[in-house]
């Protein structure tokens, strides 16, 4: 320990800290200024940016002793009495979603504005090039910065870019800000790692040394002997069942006999400091007998492939999913053109900027924790609780899961990470235990997007009518089932695309391998099948000599048409309108599909998509919500549904405010505390606006009915004549305050708290016909790309999208989902690939996984299409996933139109593309990760 | 994770050398730390973690950019950002500004140094590529007390292997001639959007024209990576000397480069074939810029922050 003097946000601090500290560590752990976030610790993500003597630096790699005597400014020091213009404009332009990156973006931008009071888009892109945001897609960020610059110059702020919506109500279809948004721009917002408890210990997990190996011996004695170590636990210490899993129980809490992938947990440690825990893990001795590795899903299905899970009748076959529709032979017999191709998509990584973190607090530790409590940013709190309880051998009610703010999820925070481990360590030590994963560990451990191989055969008549689709999909499920069954089912059922295809035969094989498990990831399998479907559509259109837009319009799903699973669509099919909107914009002016200019080939490409809302497939879909009114006239909405940045908090508050005629600010939302909030079900499948939205709507509706009765008596009028408006309950000139009515109701002994258990409309299992899903969202996107002829470098210049989401309850938030989804999907198409070599991940650092940065952000125009869904709240259906489904095929169709080369494997490889162009090849089958 | 125990801020190069010597090999130099701190975190490098770090970012005599009698002296601890901001370097050593201007993002350029880029000895460090084309010399303070100026290329012993041992030796400064009338230089590189932040290929060229402003008197070219260490493309340079500064000459130089340079395939980065093709693309992009700068005496760095 040594003394250091720092001036942080104008305050001088003299600290005694180890010389090995980084500036980020001192700010976060010694000074408790947790607004500065750590996303990677490798100078990649930029979200730890602070100013040292005015210069922006990555605090994660800035040794603190270099800062001796210097002036440090963090996000906490930016607001000077009132919010900094950047903070205000980030809120106004909805440039904040999960908020985990926000302090970094704002600090980087603040330095820019000091140097350049009037930055243009290029200047902003240069300054923020290495400060990542995984949620927003950056368009709103650019607008917010320009607006803040304007304010700082003493001019007017720029208006936010509000999308057009139809029939707005008082609070619905209005862009209300998320309630706690100010916390996210000031650094006050607390994510899991920002919580500290007295006496807290630090955990670390020992992971497998081989992708597939038998465990012969584990010796923890040296680790246990290390001073400061409080517990070292292995499989033998799991108090209950040593297993977890979301659909199948197949995942060991701690591996006993064998490890099945490199992220498998073998032992866990709790110690007084993180350093000691890290050291202790290295002292655990494990003897392994390495086993042959199953590295790809096609091989996994061959008879000689070793078994990932022994004793399963189906071997490595996790699930065979089938769609049969019409008569496939007849369909192809009728076809004049048949196109059959095979497509490859890679494993991809969510790269949410907040690595996984969980804290366990033992029962009775202090007055706030009478139960074993786990703090975690989770997408499914109640299932976490259930899985923790099973492993701990206690009833569900003995465990409390407290959801905290989530720094991005995208499907990657549905599975158990450290939740069970911290519960075990907390019980074993009698102390709170925090387990924070490093970026490396996060990359290694959590389930990814399935790599797929998709063979698809599409048939159509000369007049452009689709007659048949046959497809075979292989999905790499990795070592554990996670959500593979559901994800690959979605890939399968959506493999005809959003078209009327009378005959279909689709087979999907989800396979176990020794790769990292695959699970949920925005798009849920449909991202992969759309890549194949939509390129085949263009190939067929070309073979028929039909314009690709017309070809899609001709076959587009519409009301009255049946999907490949036999579901007859009865309403809310906005596909045609979405195609028309995009087409009109794309063709405005002097339109050409392709042209050349100054060393670049330009091309437009188009693709469509659809995506179910809700679990579907016969799974009972339920969400519970509680709405309680208080005597001060405020209302609290409670449900265990996750807001991972998409803004569910605002949506639920808007619905309650609308139903109860309250000012928006009078509604509070409490999410994800299994002791205080009822089960909202998983935050997945774009379901929460629909499901929890409905639950809140009905609960609020019942509360209104109850309060109406009381008010009616008071005003001496029939209840149905009352209007609830801005906190008042009115009837013809008479009115009474909402708060007053609540007091009256309570005085009468009425409970002003209503719980509603909302069941989504019934769905049918695959293969039984009928409604497999209760709603679908639709989208069309057009992409304008250029290919640099001298290098093969691909750039996306414009994306035009039109998305049918039923109703935009919060237009700016919906637009944020669309812009963020599109940019994330650009990564899927152009840069992202999680590489695994024979079961061993090569992508162990963020430096080896490039997601889109602000400099890749194209101009995005997003139109909303609002074909109401009669069961959705105010007509809304899902929006979370639909924007990231068709971007990749739109870009690849555009590349084909630009240079005549069809890309069958993503991410698009400029190297292979350039060489194909040179040789006159028309097809590229390899991606960059094929370069050995 | 403790990556080091003690931390020392050296105020001069001599102090840094003295500290290194006190630790007899158990301390290591750190500058911006944009390579080192990331390296030290890797579990496979755990055994290489030093006892102490000697920080040279505040060493006054390693932080200056000077132009005297037509010779630039640039301290090894000068950051990429400082290089980019220097109007003198932009005017008289444009390629260096262009190459430092594309390293990482602003936060990395604000702390990452030219010395760190060279000491790391990667086959294609961007700053390094330009220093090689500028025929720079490096001032090294050896652990045994000697100080000497060496051609910078003498520092590279293999991919990531330097003649310097940053546990004992110190890179203090670089020096190179400023572009005179009739001289110009340029840097360009090709990146890919995937994988690690290292160029597929970088290219720095320096050109001197005869007084007719049309004939190439001299040329220096560094293309990297085409071998384990950053090296000059001697045959390609020879193909330019004495030739008119025009497109035909460039094509002849490209042909020679194609014949004499044999870039390799590197895993997850580029095929050798693509790199070979990109040699042409880069020479066709960089040489005309350098010709123009040499002929006009005007130079504005391009692509900074790209
Ligand atoms: C996100 C990111 C992007 C990057 N992009 C690029 C890029 O585009 N192009 C590129 O070329 N590089 C890139 N880099 C690598 C790196 O930033 C540069 O190589 C930088 O110049 C290294 O300098 P530094 O001062 O940070 O070195 P350090 O990390 O401090 O040191 C690197 C090595 O050199 C030694 N060393 C440093 N200074 C001296 C000295 N004066 N004497 C003796 N030894 C010394 C250290 O001991 C260490 O071994 C990137 C890095 C990151 C994190
Ligand atoms: S750059 Fe510092 S945490 Fe990512
Ligand atoms: S809001 Fe930027 S990462 Fe979530």
Image: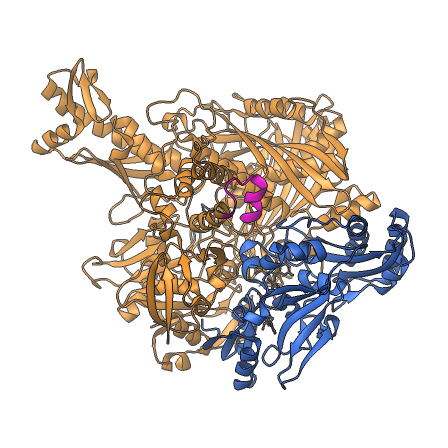
**Side of A549 relative to A695 (left or right):** right
State which quarter of the image contains the C terminus of chain A: bottom right
Q: Nearer the viewer, residue A276 or A261?
A: A276
State which quarter of the image contains the N terminus of chain A: bottom left
Give percent across and percent down for residue A828: 59, 46
**Side of B248 relative to A244 (left or right):** right
Prevailing secondary structure class for the magenta stretch in the rendered image: helix
Q: Answer yes or no: is residue A241 visible.
A: no
Res. A529 image quadrant: top right
Q: Answer yes or no: is residue B172 visible.
A: yes
Which chain: orange? A
Res. A713 image quadrant: top left
- The residue sitting at 34% across, 52% down in the picture is A190
Q: Is residue B33 magenta?
A: no
Q: Nearer the viewer, residue B123 or A168?
A: B123
Identify whether A544 is placed above or below B276: above
Identify whether B277 is placed above or below A680: below
Range shown magenta: A115-127
- The residue sitting at 51% across, 48% down in the picture is A115
Give percent across and percent down for residue A824: 54, 44
Which chain: blue? B
């Amino acid at each position: 320990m040594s003394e250091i003097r720092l001036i942080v946000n104008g305050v001088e601090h003299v600290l005694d800290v180890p010389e090995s500290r980084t500036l980020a560590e001192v700010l976060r752990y010694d000074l408790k200024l947790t607004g500065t976030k750590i996303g990677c610790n490798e100078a990649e993500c930029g979200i730890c940016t602070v100013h040292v003597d005015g210069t922006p630096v990555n605090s994660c790699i800035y040794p603190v002793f270099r800062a001796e005597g210097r002036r440090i400014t963090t996000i906490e020091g930016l607001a000077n009495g009132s919010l900094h213009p950047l903070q205000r404009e980030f809120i106004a332009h909805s440039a904040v979603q999960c908020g985990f990156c926000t302090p970094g973006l704002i600090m980087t931008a603040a330095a820019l504005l000091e140097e350049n009071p009037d930055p243009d888009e290029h200047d902003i892109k240069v300054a923020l090039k290495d400060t990542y945001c995984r949620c927003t897609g950056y368009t709103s960020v650019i607008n917010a910065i320009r607006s803040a610059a304007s304010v700082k110059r003493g001019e007017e702020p720029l208006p936010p870019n509000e999308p057009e919506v139809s029939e707005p109500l008082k609070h619905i279809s209005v862009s209300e800000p998320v309630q706690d948004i100010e916390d996210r721009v000031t650094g006050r917002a607390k994510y899991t790692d920002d919580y500290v408890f007295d006496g807290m210990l630090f955990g670390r997990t020992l992971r497998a040394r081989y992708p597939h190996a038998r465990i012969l011996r584990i010796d923890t004695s040296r680790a246990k002997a290390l001073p400061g170590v409080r517990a070292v636990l292995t499989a033998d210490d799991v108090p209950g069942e040593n297993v977890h899993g979301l659909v199948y129980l197949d995942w060991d809490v701690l591996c006993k006999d064998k490890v099945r992938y490199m992220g498998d947990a073998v032992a866990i440690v709790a110690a007084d400091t993180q350093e000691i825990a890290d050291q202790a893990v290295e002292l655990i001795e494990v003897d392994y007998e390495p086993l042959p590795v199953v590295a790809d899903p096609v091989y996994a299905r061959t008879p000689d492939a070793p078994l990932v899970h022994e004793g399963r009748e189906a071997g490595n076959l996790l699930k065979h999913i089938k769609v049969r529709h019409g008569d496939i032979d007849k369909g192809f017999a009728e076809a004049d053109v048949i196109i059959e191709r095979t497509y490859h998509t890679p494993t991809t990584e969510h790269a949410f900027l907040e690595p996984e973190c969980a804290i366990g607090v033992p029962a009775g530790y202090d007055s706030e924790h009478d139960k074993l409590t786990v703090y975690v940013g989770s997408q499914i709190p109640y299932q976490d609780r259930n899985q923790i309880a099973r492993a701990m051998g206690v009833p569900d009610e003995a465990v409390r899961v407290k959801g905290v703010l989530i720094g991005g999820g995208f499907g990657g925070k549905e599975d158990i990470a450290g939740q069970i481990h911290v519960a075990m360590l907390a019980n074993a030590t009698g102390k709170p235990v925090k387990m924070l994963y490093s970026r490396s560990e996060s990359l290694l451990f959590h389930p990814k997007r399935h790599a797929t191989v998709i063979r698809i055969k599409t048939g159509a008549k000369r007049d452009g009518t689709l007659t048949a689709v046959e497809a075979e999909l292989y999905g790499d499920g990795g070592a554990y089932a996670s959500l593979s069954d559901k994800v690959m089912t979605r890939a399968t059922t959506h493999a005809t695309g959003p078209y009327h295809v009378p005959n279909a035969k689709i087979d999907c094989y989800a396979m176990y391998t020794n790769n990292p498990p695959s699970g949920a990831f925005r798009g849920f399998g449909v991202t992969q099948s759309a890549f194949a479907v939509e390129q085949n559509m263009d190939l067929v259109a070309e073979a028929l000599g039909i314009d690709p837009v017309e070809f899609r319009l001709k076959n587009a799903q519409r009301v009255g048409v049946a999907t490949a699973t036999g579901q007859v669509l009865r309403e809310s099919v906005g596909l045609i309108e979405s195609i028309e909107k995009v087409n009109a914009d794309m063709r405005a002016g002097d339109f050409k599909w392709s042209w050349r200019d100054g060393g670049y080939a330009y091309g437009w490409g188009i693709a469509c998509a659809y995506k179910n809302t809700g679990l579907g497939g016969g799974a009972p879909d339920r969400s519970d919500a509680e709405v309680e009114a208080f005597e001060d006239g405020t209302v609290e909405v409670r449900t265990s549904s996750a807001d991972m940045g998409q803004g569910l908090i605002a949506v639920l508050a808007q619905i309650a405010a609308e139903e109860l005629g309250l000012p928006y600010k009078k509604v509070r939302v409490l999410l994800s505390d299994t002791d205080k909030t009822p089960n909202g079900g998983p935050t997945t499948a774009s379901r929460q606006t629909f499901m929890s939205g409905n639950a809140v709507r009905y609960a609020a509706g019942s509360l209104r009915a109850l309060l109406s009765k009381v008010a009616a008596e008071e005003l001496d009028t029939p209840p149905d004549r009352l209007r609830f408006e801005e906190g008042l309950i009115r009837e013809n000139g008479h009115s009474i305050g909402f708060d007053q009515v609540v007091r009256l109701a309570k005085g009468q002994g009425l409970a002003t708290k209503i719980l509603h258990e909302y069941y989504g409309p019934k769905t049918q299992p695959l293969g039984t016909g009928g409604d497999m899903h209760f709603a679908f969202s639709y989208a069309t996107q057009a992409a304008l790309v250029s290919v640099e002829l001298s290098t093969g470098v691909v750039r996306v210049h414009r994306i035009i999208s039109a998305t049918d989401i039923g109703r935009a309850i919060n237009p700016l938030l919906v637009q944020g989902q669309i812009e963020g989804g599109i940019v994330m999907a650009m990564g899927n198409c152009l840069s992202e690939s999680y590489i695994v070599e024979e079961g061993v991940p090569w992508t162990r650092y963020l430096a080896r996984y490039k997601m889109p940065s602000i400099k890749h952000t194209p101009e995005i125009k997003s139109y909303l299409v609002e074909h109401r869904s009669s069961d959705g709240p105010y007509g809304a259906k899902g929006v979370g996933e639909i924007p990231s489904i068709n971007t990749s095929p739109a870009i690849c169709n555009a590349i084909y139109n630009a240079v005549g080369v069809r890309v069958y494997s993503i991410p698009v490889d400029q190297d292979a593309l350039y060489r194909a162009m040179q040789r006159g090849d028309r097809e590229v089958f390899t991606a960059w990760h094929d370069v050995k | 994770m403790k990556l080091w125990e003690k931390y020392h801020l050296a105020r001069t190069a001599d102090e840094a050398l003295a500290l290194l010597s006190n630790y007899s090999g158990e301390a290591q130099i750190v500058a911006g730390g944009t390579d080192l701190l990331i390296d030290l975190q890797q579990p496979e490098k755990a055994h290489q973690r030093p006892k102490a770090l000697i920080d040279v970012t505040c060493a006054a005599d390693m932080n200056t950019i000077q132009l005297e009698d037509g010779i630039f002296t640039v301290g090894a601890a000068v950051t990429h950002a400082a290089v980019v901001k220097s109007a003198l370097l932009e005017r008289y050593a444009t390629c260096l500004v262009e190459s430092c201007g594309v390293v990482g993002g602003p936060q990395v350029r604000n702390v990452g140094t030219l010395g760190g880029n060279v000491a790391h000895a990667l086959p294609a460090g961007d700053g390094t590529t330009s220093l090689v084309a500028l025929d720079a010399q490096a001032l090294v303070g050896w652990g045994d007390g000697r100080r000497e100026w060496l051609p910078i290329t003498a520092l590279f012993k293999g991919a990531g292997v330097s003649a310097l041992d940053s546990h004992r030796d110190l890179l203090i400064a670089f020096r190179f001639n400023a572009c005179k009338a009739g001289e110009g230089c340029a840097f360009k590189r090709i990146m890919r959007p995937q994988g690690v932040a290292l160029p597929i290929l970088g290219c720095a060229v320096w050109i001197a024209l005869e007084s007719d402003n049309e004939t190439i008197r001299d040329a220096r070219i560094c293309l990297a990576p085409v071998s384990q260490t950053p090296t000059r493309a001697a045959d390609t340079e020879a193909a330019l000397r004495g030739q008119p500064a025009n497109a035909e000459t460039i094509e002849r130089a490209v042909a020679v480069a194609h014949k004499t340079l044999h870039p390799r395939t590197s895993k997850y980065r580029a095929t050798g074939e693509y790199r070979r093709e990109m040699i042409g693309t880069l020479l066709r992009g960089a040489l005309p810029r350098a010709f123009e700068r040499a002929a006009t005496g005007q130079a504005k760095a391009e692509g900074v922050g790209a």
